[in-house]
């Protein structure tokens, strides 16, 4: 029979009991000074052996878990590097967005929500002007201009000797073509900024090419950009709605004349007021579109050819003002740099926090094991 060791007394001492052939015999151990021989059956010894085996299996499982976490932590930096490399490659491969206000798709008139279609033309810094409404023979765009409603907008940048003087020349050229000036801004030269001017020109559409050619003679053309929007569908829809509302208004006027009692007269007047208000709104939209079609909108920027040398302060107060300006400029530059770096810092901080948490969790599990 197996032996069982029993600890008795206030001082730890072991007792081993053995059973063999129905007779108990003491364990001949040198440490058996306080051992008492107690017979133990095989049934009572089996649970002790199973508990020892379970404990041993638990220790093995914990060691394997700790080893797996250690291997995972070794592979984690490689995974993070692969993810960051993929993100950087994806960010570098995104092409720059380009807008073409009329590449054969939908276009919307300024200030309105209903779409139309039209091509766009952009000329480079050579100053060459392209008419985006001209199509080659046999193409699907070969439609008479009198049958289409097209809005033309554009930007022209010219470098001149004296922008302030050239403004008057641009105004004269525009007015001679039958156009008008919607806005005009002149910025005289200062100690820190060269002279410049900005004008919004409204030029008759049939005089646009000739007027642009004259404006280019003012100086050196930096670039010319022309965009067109075909709003024929918009104008046709507005015309149909205006005609329908006008017919409804005429019928209501006839009913008002034939009204026989006050109740009918009030009802007709209310309906007539509602229809007339809607009709006036549609007519205002139609007039706006007609003006946009008849007059092209060109934004003209005039810049000076020379550069302005920064002036030196003349006195103490001027020096303070100059120093303050430099400080504000430096702070603005620093804020721009911080704003540029902030997304990267946040991303790196998030990755560092994840790595720290994973390492801390692995250490806790390893300590527990």
Image (spheres, helix red, strand yellow):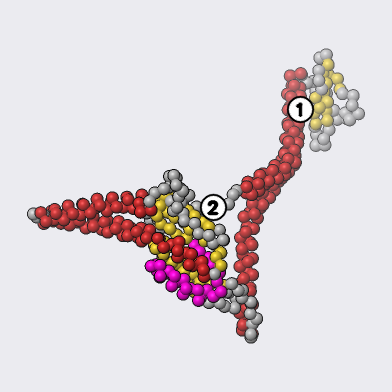
Q: Is residue 228 above or below residue 28?
A: below
Number of the front mark, 1 or 2: 2
Horizontal arrangement in the rendering, residue 282 relative to residue 193 (left or right): left
How many marks can you see?
Answer: 2
Horizontal arrangement in the rendering, residue 15 relative to residue 118 (left or right): right
- Residue 365 lies, in percent from the top left, at 71, 40
Identify the residue at image location x=64%, y=70%. 330
- Decide: few, some or many residues near mark 2? Use Cα within 10 Å; few <14, some 14-19, many ≥20: few
Identify the residue at image location x=60%, y=74%. 306
Horizontal arrangement in the rendering, residue 63 relative to residue 100 (left or right): right
Q: Is residue 357 visible?
A: no
- Residue 151 lies, in percent from the top left, at 41, 57
Say the numbered circle drawn on residue 98: 2
Gap in angstroms between the C-alphas marked 1 and 2: 74 Å
Residues at circles 1 and 2 in contact by the CB criterion of under 8 Å: no
Q: Is residue 147 above or below residue 185?
A: above
Q: Earlier in the sequence, mark 1 or mark 2?
A: 1
Q: Is residue 344 visible?
A: yes
Q: Which residues are magenta?
A: 155-184
Q: Nearer the viewer, residue 240 or 127?
A: 127
Considering the image in quadrants, where does the C terminus appear?
top right
Q: Residue furthest left?
A: 260
Q: Is residue 193 above or below residue 65?
A: below
Residue named by callout 1: 52
Identify the residue at image location x=53%, y=60%. 128
- Residue 30 lies, in percent from the top left, at 91, 29
């Amino acid at each position: 029979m197996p032996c069982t060791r029993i600890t008795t007394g206030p001082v730890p001492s072991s007792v081993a009991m053995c059973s063999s052939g129905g007779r108990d015999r003491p364990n001949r151990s040198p440490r058996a000074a306080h051992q008492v021989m107690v017979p133990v059956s095989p049934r009572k010894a089996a649970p002790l052996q199973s508990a020892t085996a379970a404990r041993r299996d638990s220790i093995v499982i914990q060691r394997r878990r700790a080893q797996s976490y250690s291997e995972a932590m070794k592979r984690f930096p490689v995974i993070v590097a692969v993810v960051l490399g993929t993100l950087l490659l994806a960010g570098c491969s995104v092409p720059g967005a380009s807008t073409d206000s009329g590449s054969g798709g939908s276009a919307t008139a300024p200030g309105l929500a209903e779409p139309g279609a039209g091509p766009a033309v952009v000329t480079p810094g050579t100053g060459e002007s392209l008419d985006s409404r001209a199509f080659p023979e046999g193409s699907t765009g070969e439609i008479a201009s009198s049958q289409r409603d097209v809005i033309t907008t554009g930007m022209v940048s010219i470098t001149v000797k004296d922008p302030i003087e050239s403004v008057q020349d641009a105004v004269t050229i525009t007015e001679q073509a039958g156009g008008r000036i919607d806005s005009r801004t002149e910025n005289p030269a200062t100690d820190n900024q060269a002279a410049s001017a900005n004008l919004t020109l409204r030029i008759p559409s049939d005089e646009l090419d000739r007027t642009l050619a004259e404006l280019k003679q003012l100086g050196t053309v930096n670039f010319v950009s022309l965009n067109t929007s075909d709003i024929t569908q918009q104008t046709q829809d507005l015309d149909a709605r205006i005609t329908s509302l006008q017919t409804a208004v005429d019928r209501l006027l006839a009913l008002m004349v034939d009204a026989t009692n006050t109740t009918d007269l009030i009802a007709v007047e209310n309906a007539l007021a509602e229809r007339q208000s809607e009709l006036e709104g549609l007519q205002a939209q139609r007039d706006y579109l007609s003006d946009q079609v008849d007059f092209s909108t060109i934004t003209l920027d005039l810049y000076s050819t020379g550069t302005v040398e920064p002036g030196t302060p003349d006195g103490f107060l001027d020096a303070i003002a100059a120093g303050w300006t430099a400080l504000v400029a430096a702070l603005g530059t620093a804020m721009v740099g911080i704003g540029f770096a902030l997304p990267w810092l946040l991303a790196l901080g998030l990755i560092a926090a994840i790595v720290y948490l994973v390492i801390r969790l692995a250490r806790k599990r390893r300590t527990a094991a």
